[in-house]
Amino acid sequence: MERQDAALDRLIAPGTTVRKLGEGMRWSEGPVWIADGQYLLFSDVPGNRIHKWSEAEGLTVWKEPSGGDGPAKPGFREPGTNGLKPGFAGQILAADHGSRAIAAIDLATKAKRMLVTSYQGKKFNSPNDIAVAADGTIWFTDPPYGLDGLNDSPLKEQKANGVYRATSDGKAVLVEPSLSFPNGLGFSPDGKTLYVTVSDPKRAVIMAYDVTPQQTLARARVFSDMTALVSPANPGLPDGMTVDEYGNVWSSGPGGIHIFSPAGKRLGLIRTGTAIANLAFGGPDGTTLFLTSNHMLVSLPTKVHAAPVHAPAIFETGERG
């Protein structure tokens, strides 16, 4: 762990190390802690599975296939679910590559229903990650990582690799069309700032935006630029992220997990030795940080909790555009 500011000691004890919880995934992603049951779910996106981990049972397969409505279809390089987030009571939200949609999955039956599947009559690329705002609106990113050929895929219908919000009547609104490869996203504790990572080695940045009362984005700015750190010696790019109760931003990036103050000051780097896809707080007291780390799942203890988690608004079932 590289300590770059004394404020890091408030968040993590000096000398903290990661604990390996399981391995064997092809690319682990999207961890979400299920407090009612005390277990973690996370995606193996190319493996098309959702895995479950608990202290008592270890690592198991929870749902297979996870993406789409059956076996992977031609044209998909990563057909499974990606980002997972707390959802309606007894459900989780899932960014579903195979269905090219945002879905809800019932924790008891594992049944899946589509919430938002299109924008202006065209299918999404491959929804990647999700954040829920304080008012219950679901925000998500839509890069083309699930498609063979990425931007050159013949299946790609959306011109933009966009950031969207979904209203409670199931309609998608494009709020940011200009990013090359938007990926992880999260809100500040007061809900007034949206952070979005960009997984582009030529412009590896975290963007910040003001969220207006009309739920549009304003004052786009670079919160952190990690482009100069991209190298084989620092595996990974800005990908998944989370925000803690004090507003600090924890983001995957070149070399591991980068931690920033709300003002954008770099506090430290947790070097992991492998690319980190995503991260989430959880555990019995909410202070364990779970990391989906390439083919592994790891964790480390911290001194903080996640920013408030909000329940999504009620959605009508069915395709909306």
Image (spheres, grey):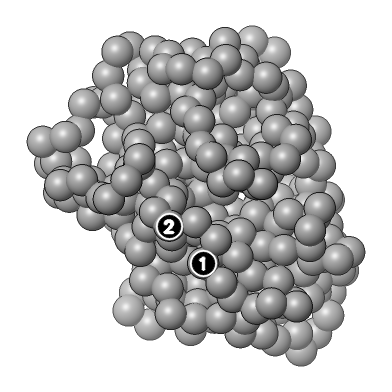
Q: Residue at x 71, y 57 (%)?
A: 33
Please report the residue visible at 36 percent of the width from the left and 21 percent of the height from the top.
Answer: 118
Seen in the image, is 294 located left or right of residue 308? left
| Residue 86 is at least partly visible in this image | yes
**Could you say which is closer to the camera, residue 171 or residue 215?**
171
Query: What is the three-letter code of the residue carrying label 1?
Result: Val
The quarter of the picture where the N terminus appears is bottom right
Q: Residue at x 34, y 74 (%)?
A: 231
Residue 243 x, y percent position in the rendering:
71, 50
The label on residue 44 is none
- Between 219 and 97, the one lying in front of the other is 97
Q: Amino acid at mark 2?
A: Glu
* Residue neighbourhood size for the residue with mark 2, other residues' Cα within 10 Å, grouped as few (<14), some (14–19), many (≥20): some
Image location (x, y in percent) of residue 86: 68, 43
Q: Secondary structure at mark 1?
A: strand
Image mark for residue 61: 1
Residue at (51, 37) in percent of width and height:
112
Classify mark 2: helix, strand or loop.
loop
160 shown above or below 294: above
Residue 123 at x, y percent in the picture: 29, 25
Q: Count residues near mark 1 (Cα–Cα under 10 Å), then give few for <14, some for 14-19, many for 20+.
A: some
Residues 318 and 280: in front is: 318
Up-down: is 24 above or below 166?
below
**Residue linked to disc 2:** 64
